[in-house]
Amino acid sequence: MSTPSIPAATTRRPRTPLTALLLLGAVLTLLLGGAGTASAHATLNRSDPADSALLKTAPQQITLTFSESVTLSDGSLRVLSPKNLRVDRGAVGHAAGTGDTAQVRLAGKLPEGTYTVAWRAVSTDSHPISGAFTFSIGQPSATVVALPTGSPDDTAASHLYSFFRSIAYGGFALFAGAALFTLLCWPAGAGLRPVRRLILAGWTALFAATVVLLLLRGPYETRRGLTAVFDVSLLGSTITGRAGLALCVRLLLLAAAGVLLARYATRPSRAVRAAGALLAVGLALTWAAAEHASAGLQVPLAIPVAVLHLLAMAAWLGGLLALLVVLFRAPAGQEIRAEVVTRFSRLAFTAVAVLVATGVYQSWRQVGSWQALSTTEYGRLLALKVVAVVLVLTAASFSRQWVDRIVQDRATESLPATTAERTRVTQTVGAGASSGGDTAERTSSPDKSPASPEHAEPPDAPDFDRHRRALRRSVAVEAALGVVVLAITTLLTGTQPGRAAVASAAAVEAAREPTARVAMVPFDVGTPNGNGTVQITIASGRVGDNTVEAVVYGPDKGFVTVPELRLTLTQKAQRIGPLDAKLTDRQGYWATDRLRLPLAGVWTLHVTVRVTDVDQVTVAQDVSIRPSPA
């Protein structure tokens, strides 16, 4: 008896273990990601005046400095008096032409009291940010102004915007993925009505969602009501912005794609395929150029990586949905062949490899540390996405196993030992029976015509049907989990990245720290009543210019005067010093207005206290100096 021949597709082993190893490497690389500057979602680094500052005279302007460039609009900076009256004057602009600042002038002759500054801007990655702080002139006072506490994303427009952004992502995955499935895996499937409807549904969803996003962009950025979608001037300012321009370009590309789809969908030439590939890249670029990849670290590299990530996502998830549709909806006689499923399996593996490689880079860029994985919302969503991807790959491994079994059912049959000739047996997987599709070689007996398919001994029908139903179920589960992955991806695009969240938390914590360093330095010259404490206040306790005030307390905790008090500072780690603070007697305390500290870190204070003409002592104590604001 000769050995039955098996098609090449059946000799391939599933690559899921290698995919799992790639995914594991992605997770490990993500967790070991290095440090860097904050990425995406701008944060407020500092303000002038500072939060809770007490000023002797009224400032002429308010200046904010952010971690990255921001887009401003009318009302981005509002300054309210204690009586809730606007005191800002003129248009809001960038200070000295730098894109990471916001500045507005104030009215003259401001009365004493506490003022509120409410600000709003749009990050480079197109996400709105907002906040508020207070400062006082003369002395603090009661104010009727309520500090805004709501999130810039907690509006009706922002909720709708997030919903249609999800629709846009899904539409792109369906449109591009289904088109790639027909071009690369099953060109003959382009003529099937279910496949054409799937591609058209993806195009329609993406086009409609993009139009709605363009209309909602203005209210989303300005926190205005939904009726603002009818404000023509607001729409005009939206179109000139980065996000609005990207949406307009997306509509133009979709219009061109629609023409190709209508005229050449069933007979795509090589030129049409090349044009379709360029349109797919262009569509992905409209996301990459206006969201997280467009801000933060390594933007020239991050944008093409984001484009590859989106295209791989579409090829995988959109192609998976296309496969699911043809498995269940293909007309009788036009069932999908097992070879097509094998081709898609190879395409999906390549897409997953690209997703892992690009995802590792994006994760390092956006998360950056172990801590951010568990302490930030972005990190927790990313971990959830990794779990969902692992589940999808598990379902994909089962799908591949069922495909192999179906191909083997069609290819291997027990025949008499005298057979030496070969014939062809069709292999189909779908809604109908085994008509049409790929063929596999088999041996036949001499008394049967090899050219007659009806003489071929059929495989075990119950096993074949069972394997086909199992394939449908596993692909359905895989597609459902893929939709979950897509939903989590959409949430990630609207969530502040881990790096930026950590930086924002650090900025808030730094703002809560005391604005000065206070050191209590005890001394004892060894004579009666020759002991006490020197209180040294260094403001602002940061790198750069500082003011120093020193007060001497006696053994009874009361103020005392001394004939001499000298202060020097040394940083042992960098071998800097001693720096003489040059304190002068201010009739009751010692002070200087100009102490320049060049480096952050631990400095040692050397305090020399002379209480009489001959009695003096030098004591030391460490103090920590913070870096200057970025």
Image (spheres, rainbow, N blue to C red):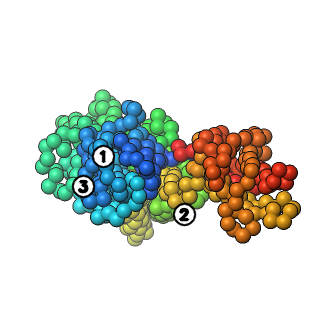
Position of 611 compared to 4: left or right? Answer: right
- Residue 45: tell me if it is visible: yes
Give x and y (percent) for residue 354: 49, 45
Q: Amino acid at mark 2?
A: Ser
Q: Nearer the viewer, mark 1 or mark 3?
A: 1
Which of 25/295 is in front?
295
Q: Which residue is mark 2?
A: 374
User: Which label sits on residue 10?
Assistant: none
First in residue order: circle 1 vs circle 3: 3
Disc 1 crowd, CA 10 A, few/some/many (<14, 14-19, 20+): few
Secondary element at image label 1: loop
Q: Residue furthest top?
A: 271
Query: Which residue shows up at 46% across the image and 37% down it?
Result: 299
Give x and y (percent) for residue 214: 22, 46
Q: Amino acid at mark 1?
A: Lys
Mark 1 vs 2: CB contact within 8 A:
no
Disc 3 crowd, CA 10 A, few/some/many (<14, 14-19, 20+): few
User: Which label sits on residue 85?
Assistant: 3
User: Which label sits on residue 109?
Assistant: 1
